[in-house]
Image (cartoon, rainbow, N blue to C red):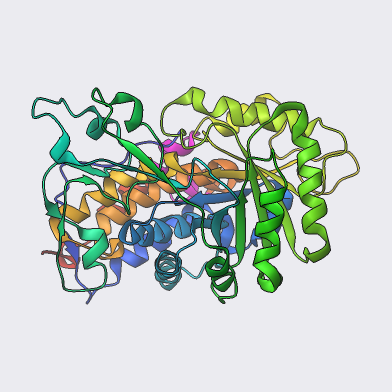
Amino acid sequence: MALNFYNSAIPAQLKLTFGSNKCHQNVKNLVSRVGVPSISCSPDESLQKGNWVKLICGASFEDVADIRNLSLVYTLAGVDCIDCAADASVVSAVNEGIEAARVIVPLRRPWVMVSVNDDEDLHFRKAEFDPDNCPLDCPRPCENVCPASAILFEKEKSIAEVSYRTNQTGEQKGGVITERCYGCGRCFPVCPYNKIGMVTYVRDTAATAELLRRDDVDAVEIHTSARQTKPFRELWDGLGDSITYLRLVAVSLPNIGDETVSSMNSMYSIMQPRLSCFNLWQLDGRPMSGDIGQGATRQSIEFAVHLASAKYRPPGFLQLAGGTNAHTVDGLKRKGLFQTCEPKQKHSIIGGIAYGGYARKITGRILSSLQPQHGFACIEDYPHHLLEALGEAIALVGSVGDNSSVQSQVHTCKLATVVHLGTQLRIAVQYEILQLPSSSIQNS
């Protein structure tokens, strides 16, 4: 389980002086100690070994400031892929975070994936309401349940939308902050006055095709209900030759029982004539719920068990998503599916795991603590925050890889003789923070 390294006693205003590279050196030390696999392992090799880890920023999450810093942290943690909204500014923010991470540590670049939908889908919607219509005595349960801090009842400065890479500030009208809402739907049922509505949308196919032709986009993920092939075919045909620019095509689908394999075969037959890269099936168990609790991952594991035993399923790697969290790996191990190869096959039955809400949750409190104090902030400029967020991310990402190197390297460094990965990382992070000299920190 990922541990919480954040120490509220550490002043949020501490900032790295650019005259010193001590923070970056300490990040390098931490990455070296835990043996991040992306130093030597390519994304396609990770898929074959069952070590693949994907960060899901969110198909509708468009807060470019958070996305940039999330991408930096999880690139350093060793993810193989970063999945984001099919929006040009979001893609640029992801790539900026990746390159900032690679300046600190020379890791291989994770693949960048954009998500689209062929029809209405839970991942492609936004909540909306007018706060002026809310009764003054409303207890505002929507504000409390929102995992993205996307609801405001007062006019506040909108950091993400206006000030990213500018010197401007803006006013955000109360209600739903559109760029932060990713459509989880938790606010809908809790509103005591039924004031919250929902807006669904379908990504523009032509605009998506243009994105796929960019040099800094490597993959596409198509979200589908799997119950109808017509909208899937229309989207696939609309993407045209942009598919040939990619390293990976993924299809995200829910478990529809006995019809699942048949639907997968139908979609594969549509893709196959123009499929010239790897393909992957994302098994979407319980969408956007990994941050809720341990039980949220059960549906994704059940889905994996179902498909692992299914005959005649089409070619392609299998990857879990939807409810995945710190308990997913243990669940796969109990079912004998973690990094297990099929008979006569050289690759793992389950290629890997995608983490969304849970991955954002464990680092989000650290990242969001920067914004109220500093407006848009690059996390690498704040050494304590970076090391703490990275410790959380590595504990999650590292659980999917081989952690034997963590134990030997931590022992060699005489930090402690410990077994649990989270304990090792806590000690490693605290050790690196202690190495930050006072000369490297100033009050902002």
Q: Nearer the viewer, residue 18 or 287?
A: 287
Q: Residue 77 versus residue 247: which sits nearer the camera? A: 247
Q: Position of residue 418 (x, y in %)?
A: 46, 35
Residue 215 against residue 4 in the figure, above or below = below
Q: Using the rendered image of the protein, determine whether residue 7 is visible from the camera's viewpoint.
A: yes
Q: Which residues are magenta?
A: 409-426
Q: Is residue 414 magenta?
A: yes
**Residue 3 vertical position relative to residue 90 in the rendered view, above or below:** above
> In this orientation, which residue lies closer to the viewer: 301 or 226?
226
The residue drawn where x is 69% and y is 69% is 240
**Residue lying farthest right?**
344
Query: In the drawing, does residue 67 fall left or right of residue 193?
Result: right
Residue at 42% across, 59% down: 71
**Residue 174 coordinates in the image, percent (x, y):** 17, 46
Is 51 situated left or right of 137 in this image?
right
Name the image quarter holding residue 139. Answer: top left
User: Toward which corner of the image does residue 104 lie, by quadrant?
Assistant: bottom left
**Residue 163 belongs to the span the image colors magenta:** no
Q: Position of residue 265 (x, y in %)?
A: 81, 44
Looking at the image, can residue 402 be seen? Answer: no
Q: 428 left or right of 193?
A: right
Up/down of 29 relative to 267, above or below: below
